[in-house]
Image: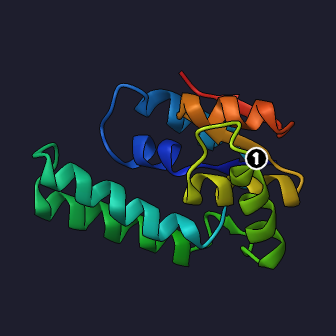
Amino acid sequence: MVYVDTSVLVAYYCPEPLSEAAERAIGKADPPTVSPLIEVEFCSALAIKVRTGELEVEWARRLLSQFRLHLEERRYRIVPVESKEYVLAADWIGRFATPLRTVDALHLASAFSNGLRLLTADRGLARSAKHFGVECELIR
């Protein structure tokens, strides 16, 4: 089973060069797994696309609505982010050995704690996963 990082979900819902790869990878996941962090980070990614002019506001609203519908329909399995994930994420960041940032560290810790392979399009996150021994698949 796989834990889907936001970078893959954004490519899945928004037209991007990696959209086809994201669609294939999510299609193979049974079921694709996320954490509650995903909705906030997905909103943030859409907001960045709107601010940079890559996406019209109305289109971003439609994509967000579709994503939320998919969450409600339980197309994604949701694993909680609990104290142990926060402790692990802080430990990894506090080693000062990788460029991990807060949300990525929490996604990585969630995948690790639940015995899931991380599916990402983020090369830096994939390198951090390898560094900490978390199984990872980088889509291209």
Query: Residue 84's spot in the image, x, y percent?
Result: 84, 72
Q: Residue at x 84, y 52 (%)?
A: 112
Quadrant hosting residue 71: bottom right
What is the x, y in percent for residue 97?
71, 37
Image x and y of residue 105, in percent: 66, 54
Q: Is residue 136 visible?
A: yes
Q: Position of residue 123 (x, y in %)?
A: 56, 28
Amino acid under disc 1: Arg
Describe residue 80's horizontal placement relative to residue 19 as left or right. right
Question: Foreground residue, 116 or 104?
Answer: 104
Q: Is residue 8 above or below residue 41?
A: above
Residue under numbered circle 1: 95
Q: Is residue 17 above or below residue 36?
A: above
46 vs 136, left or right, is: left
**Image quarter of residue 118:** top right
Residue at the spot x=76%, y=57% of the render? 109
Residue 33 shows up from this direction: no
| Side (left or right) of 91 relative to 27 | right
Query: Which residue is at a point 61% across and 45% down the rendered structure image?
Result: 100
**Is 17 situated left or right of 59 in this image?**
right
> Quick one: 67 or 57, which is closer to the camera?
57
